[in-house]
Structure formats: C-alpha cells, structure tokens
Image (cartoon, rainbow, N blue to C red):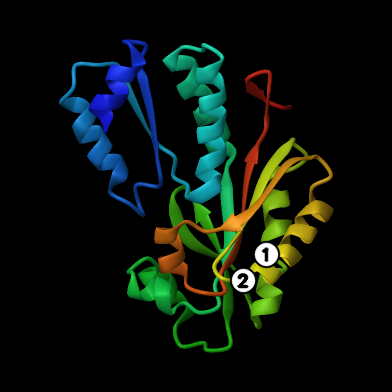
Amino acid sequence: MLTAAVAESGGDGVVVITMSSYLSSTYSTSVAQAALLDADITVIDSRCIDMAMGFGVLEAARLARSGASADEVAEAARQVLDGAEGFFCVATLDHLRAGGRVSALAKLLGGALQIVPVLRLQDGRIVSERKTRTVSRARDQPAALASQHLGDRPARVAVHHVEAPDAAAHVAELVKQEFPQLEELVIGSFGGTIAAHLGPGAVGVAVAPALVDGAPAA
C-alpha cells in the first residue's frame, strides 16, 4: 500500500495518518514499512478514532489537493488532530472488556452495575470521564463535554453510533445547541472495527477545530 502511494506521489512525499497506536497496530506497521522504503514518508499517530481522526485526514487531503508540500500537509493535520477529542458512552461495557480495551477502567468501575460511564478518548487511550446512573443520562453528556474541550473555536463535529440512529439524532440536536460556532456536523455509524469493540447502543461525539487559513482560530 505504501509502495503504491510513494509511486503516485511522484517524489513529492507521502503523509500517512493512522488511528490511535494504543488501539491498533496500524501505526507501528506503517512506521516499519516506511523504514524499508527510500522515500519521504511521514507517519502520524492520530491518537484518535473515526471522525476525530477523519477531520485531520480531510484537512490534509484538502491541502494536498491545493498543492501544499508534504510538510505543510503534515503540519495542518497535526494542528487539527492536536485539538481533536472524542467522548462516548456504551450501553454495556461487555464488548470493550472482551476486547481488552478497558481493563483498568473495568477495574475502576468494579461491579457497580448501576454505573453507566461516559468515556473519553484522551491522548489515544480510553479513559472514564464521568459516571451516570442511566444510559439516557450518559448520552446527554458527550456534546457538552466536547464543547467544553474545544471552547469557542470554530468546530467540526461528528456524531457516531452503533445501531442507535434515534439516540444519535438526539445527540446531534444537543450538539447544535452546544456549538453556536459549528461549521460542520456529520452523523453516521462508527466504523466496523470500533463498532465491534463498543457494541450496539453506543453513541459518541468527535470534535476537532476548524482551521482558518491553515491555522487554528484564536
């Protein structure tokens, strides 16, 4: 795959953006492959998943199409990804626990059957952000948390879900209320691999800063 990208680049350089290295081996695999090729390849660990990563990828693609250099493309992607964050809740921790993604979190929550955690993808790792008593209350949290994270900067937001379109529509309405500076809102399913880890009923909000003239807004 990298070999083909290098050939298509015509020597201009290649920028590779992967999902969080804590959740996937894609980053380490890409770094290893890049080391074998005599080419200008920059591999970026997004430390994100789905559209939290996707907004950085889209910004990189936009600049690449405009004729920016590989270094400029990589820098813009990093600026978006540095401000990106994800907040989500699951209907049950069973899928995350089975996938080995929340061993520490599961230990933290212990056997508290009435606790529904609101989770955060922080620096590439899944951590517990808040605890609520019901799934409906948990679903009310991600939009506000994402807004607090980004502040008043122009925002691009995605609402993801796993087989929960009605819940996602509700969260999207909360996003519109929380983000008066909203520039883009995307609603869709979590990617297949992530969906398998989160399980049915999961809903999340991914947020990233919108760049203004290639730089984050003040």
Q: Secondary structure at mark 2?
A: loop
Q: Which residue is mark 1?
A: 168
Pointers 2 and 1 in contact (CB under 8 A)?
A: yes
Left or right of 26, for residue 91: right
Residue 161 point in image, percent of width and height? 58, 64
Examine the rendered structure and indicate whether residue 181 appears above or below residue 136.
above
Residue at 46%, 88% in the rendered image? 111
Q: Secondary structure at mark 1?
A: helix
Viewport quadrant of the N terminus: top left
Which quadrant of the rendered structure holds the C terminus?
A: top right
Which residue type does callout 2 highlight? Ala
Residue picked out by circle 2: 164
In the foreground, 114 or 166: 166
Position in image of residue 143 (x %, y %): 71, 58
Which quadrant would residue 159 be assigned to in this image?
bottom right
Determine the residue positioned at 55% across, 78% down: 91
Is 207 situated above or below 56?
A: below
Q: Position of residue 88 (x, y in %)?
A: 58, 63
Label 1 sits on what residue type? Ala
Q: Is residue 42 above or below residue 54?
A: above
